Amino acid sequence: MADGQISPRKAINLADYTPPVFLVDEVALDFTLDPAATIVRATLNLRRQAPGPLALDGRDLELLSIKLNGEALGGNRYVLTESSLTLDDVPDVFTLETEVKIIPETNTELSGLYMSGTGFFTQCEPEGFRKITFFPDRPDVMARYKVTLRADQSKYPVLLSNGNNTASGAAGTQIWATWEDPHPKPSYLFALVAADLVAVKDSFTTASGREVALGIWVAAGDETRCGHAMYALKNAMKWDEDTFGLEYDLDIFNIAAVSDFNAGAMENKGLNIFNTAYVLASPATATDADFQGVERVIAHEYFHNWTGDRVTCRDWFQLSLKEGLTVFRDQEYMADQFSAAVKRISDVRSLRATQFRDDAGPLAHPVRPASYLEINNFYTTTIYEKGAEVVRMYRTLIGREAFRKGMDIYIAENDNSAATVEDFFAAMQAATAIDLKQIMRWYEQAGTPEVSFDESHDPAAQTYTLTLRQHTAPTPGQPVKQPFMIPVAMGLLDATGRDIHTETLILAQPEQSFTFHNISEPPTPSLFRNFSAPVKLQGQSRQRLAFLAAKDTDLFNRWDAMQQYATLVLLDAVKAHQAGQAFALDAGLLEAVTATLRDAARDPAFAAEALLLPAETLLADAMSIVDPDAIRFVREAARKALGETLREDFFAAYAQFAAVAASDVSGHAIASRALKNAALGYLSAAGDTTLAGAQFLSGENMTDTLAALVNVAELADERRDDAFASFYDQWRANALVLDKWFSVQARAGAPDTLARVQALTKHKDFDLRNPNRVRALIGAFAANPSKFHEASGAGYQLLADTIFTLDETNPQIAARLTTAMGSWRRYDTARQSLMKAQLERILAKEKLSPNTYEMASKALA
Ligand code: ARG
Ligand code: ZN
């Protein structure tokens, strides 16, 4: 450890969990809000549960006074440290009053109470509340809150907190408002907003006839871009009633949008706080993907009201209990809005690109980790997306009806309490006769299982036997894996592509054989339909993949077969390129793309997904030593060859799907634009850039404008520079659109990308204090495989420089960026040592945050 480094935090272990010594039944908070000196008075009604002292969490708090049952306490009655306030000698039931001073304007971590623009906002999950007042800041302490906010009326006319607004008033230039939340909640769900905002209002009538007042609070001028968020909110409220029988439980539901936010959004009870990126959308400023992002996140946070707020987590090791389940719920919601298959395809695409990669590297961790240094580092795709896959596997294993019954039991048994993964398991087990015990391994063991198969057909006996094997490679701290319980949704196809048998098998042992009867001809198995388990299926021949890509009745597997086929073909082309051979387009790939394109009208959304070649990162994952330059070269060569060979077809598709109104964001319009812009991508790759240029100029729809800009960004000449200059001039005042301007440049494959990103870090609109802007430039660049991994190492240096500076103001975001170097061992020795050197440099930094320390040290371990 370098001199001067603060000692890294001690590991917190799941095995060490003990119930709280004191519970808090009620808490009253009184805020006098001032950016430079906010005074927080807290009154806690405490009740003993176990012997021991009262230990409260507290960080960056200046204690002004403390009273026990109304009596002021001297300094000899408590012990104050950097992170706690401990009282040794206290009664079993008592009232504690504290008064602290905090400084929101210097809170750059964006955790706790902070300023964004001119307003006050909070983010308390997971451990921000301890930066607001002394409290047992752990999710298994659930209290009823009464909150009074006082602020200068001219600057902060809107005062919001959780629950119902029970009283308000004015006193001179100050206004005040009291909010009471009747539902007990953990401290991480506390929220307040004091700002100059305007509301878009609406209402929703619940199934039982209660009227709920809805408000979306945004900066003046942004009201016109809230329509989709409000639509999504009402739609999600209805969906949860229809699908899970879950009704909203307060008379008011507010959403406040903030432009400086570490995450996407937060499910605070009755007062969700959202990154503006997931609220504001209009066809002129937001892409179709942004619209879908708004809808997904609005639904996600709303669904947390039951899976998160009413039923919360006992401790942070159980984070996936609420996040995995709520992601599953938002996935199901979105699948019901558009095409279920296309939704599944895009979810699996991103699971493979992010979670599978993490699971294969030094940062791999189970869905329920056993230990952490900094819980903020565990808001990962494993906790969220793999956690959702685990919930989905429960449903696949026990069926829809039993799953719904299990959900009812889960909610009923755990309402108003802090639950564990075991509680969810118990509810599902109570709903089915199938023994689910082994499913718990998905929570305990990290890593992506690899499944391989053997088959044999016996024409005399008319039997077909399928032998499945599972193997999971070691992950940090877990050298040996026990077999998982893997649902294998499958079908057997005859030679014409017809399903002759479908079933969901359960693979629970290292190797298992399944025999099917009355099978006269050797069938083609279609395994893991609709991606029934988060595994890697190995050993499919190209011939099989080509057949399934053309014939499978399962749309997901048809897409997947084409992706796997393309992956094999491109990996071979990478080898050939490395051996100095010229690129040659595979005839089977050409045939599959041609068939997809000519059939596109039947399901354009599906065709648009099927036309996309596997991402560079996916190809990288399949190589033992990643060669980012060869991957980029080959993938681009394939796109160019396909574009040239199928030029007429792509032009025809472009024309066929172009007739959609700029303002139309219906499923049909989104699908048409996706197909049209997929065609544009191939035509541009083939050198036909006039079309992209024209589309860029005519754009009134951000999806089209951006799709054009992405292609123009590849041209390293004045056509590109003019396009970016004009885009900047048009959109400089719109932060979310300007984020796109940064990120398209950072993602470009043009040879000068690295130099441009270096220059953009000095641009006057680049701001390290704004997480969206950091993600748009630095996050996007770190996800640009061939440019970030440029052989000189200058990309690594740029990232490390950013982490170095950012760690001092926002360690959460700095730690997150560090993960981009987590896969350093997968590269050639030259790149390995360059990345390693940067990680070591970060680790040697004085006063490195525990957040970044944990990620850098684990990456190097
Ligand atoms: N619970 C929030 C959600 O809905 C996210 C909170 C993110 N917090 C964090 N420290 N990254 O997913
Ligand atoms: Zn969530």
Image (cartoon, rainbow, N blue to C red):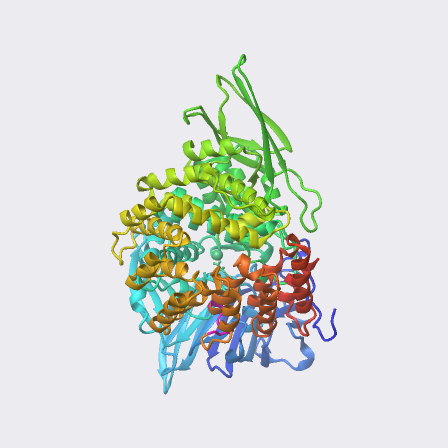
Whether residue 138 appears in this view of the structure is: no
Q: For this view, does 658 lie left or right of residue 119? A: left
Whether residue 781 appears in this view of the structure is: yes
| 405 shown above or below 466 | below
| Magenta span includes 771 | yes
| Magenta span includes 254 | no
| 318 shown above or below 44 | above
Q: Give percent across and percent down for residue 356.
A: 57, 48
The quadrant in which the N terminus is found is bottom right
Residue ID at (62%, 63%):
374
The image quadrant that residue 341 belongs to is top left
| Magenta highlight: main SS | loop
Q: Give percent across and percent down for residue 464.
A: 54, 21
Q: From the viewer's side, name the closer residue of 341 and 507.
A: 341
Image: magenta residue range: 766-772
Q: For this view, does 782 lie left or right of residue 234? A: right
Q: Give percent across and percent down for residue 658.
A: 28, 52
Q: From the viewer's side, name the closer residue of 656 and 371.
A: 656
